[in-house]
Amino acid sequence: MRKTTTITALLLFVLLSLPLAAQEFDLPPGERLLERLDRIFQETSPPLDAKLPNITLYDAAGKKFRLRSLKGQYTVLLFGCLT
């Protein structure tokens, strides 16, 4: 069972890496993949002083709260699966 999980994880990694590897060949001359990703991030990121939408989020205990309730506080928002 463990061998199957390892092989599945490796296969998934390879399949997810293929699009990034393919993009390496579409780069403008002299631009590396990490430079391209940094450029795209800089071009598409909102400015630091941009206002966030008042959306509903969930805390670590699963309790709903509005983003507006954090106004005036230093806050780190963490998105994704934490399990």
Image (spheres, rainbow, N blue to C red):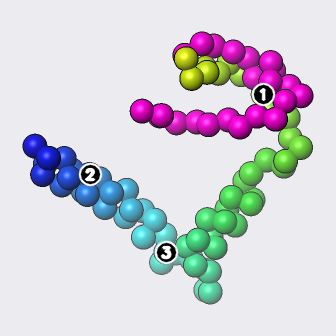
Instruction: Tell me, yes or no, whether the highlighted magenta stretch contains residue 65.
Output: yes
Task: Residue 63: give x, y in percent of width and height.
Answer: 60, 13
Q: Is residue 5 left or right of residue 33?
A: left
The residue singled out by tag 3 in the image is 24
Q: Amino acid at mark 1?
A: Pro
Of residues 27 and 41, the one nearer the viewer is 41
Instruction: Identify the residue shown where x is 86% and y is 25%.
Output: 71
Q: Which residue is mark 1?
A: 53
Residue 36's mark?
Answer: none
**In the depicted structure, whether residue 35 falls above or below residue 8:** below
Q: Label 2, on which residue?
A: 9
Q: CA distance from mark 3 to mark 2?
A: 23 Å
Which quadrant is the C terminus positioned in? top left
Foreground mark, 3 or 1, reads 1
Element assignment for label 1: loop
Image location of residue 74, percent across then percent down: 82, 35
Upstream in sequence: badge 3 or badge 1:
3
Q: Tell me which amino acid carries mark 2.
A: Ala
Give the residues in magenta: 62-83
Q: Marks 1/2: CA distance?
A: 36 Å
Whether residue 65 is visible to the viewer of this picture, yes or no, is yes
- Location of residue 73 with respect to 23 vertically, above or below: above
Number of marks drawn: 3
Q: Quadrant of the N terminus?
A: top left
Q: Residue at x 63, y 13 (%)?
A: 64
Q: Position of residue 40 (x, y in %)?
A: 67, 62
Q: Earlier in the sequence, mark 1 or mark 2?
A: 2
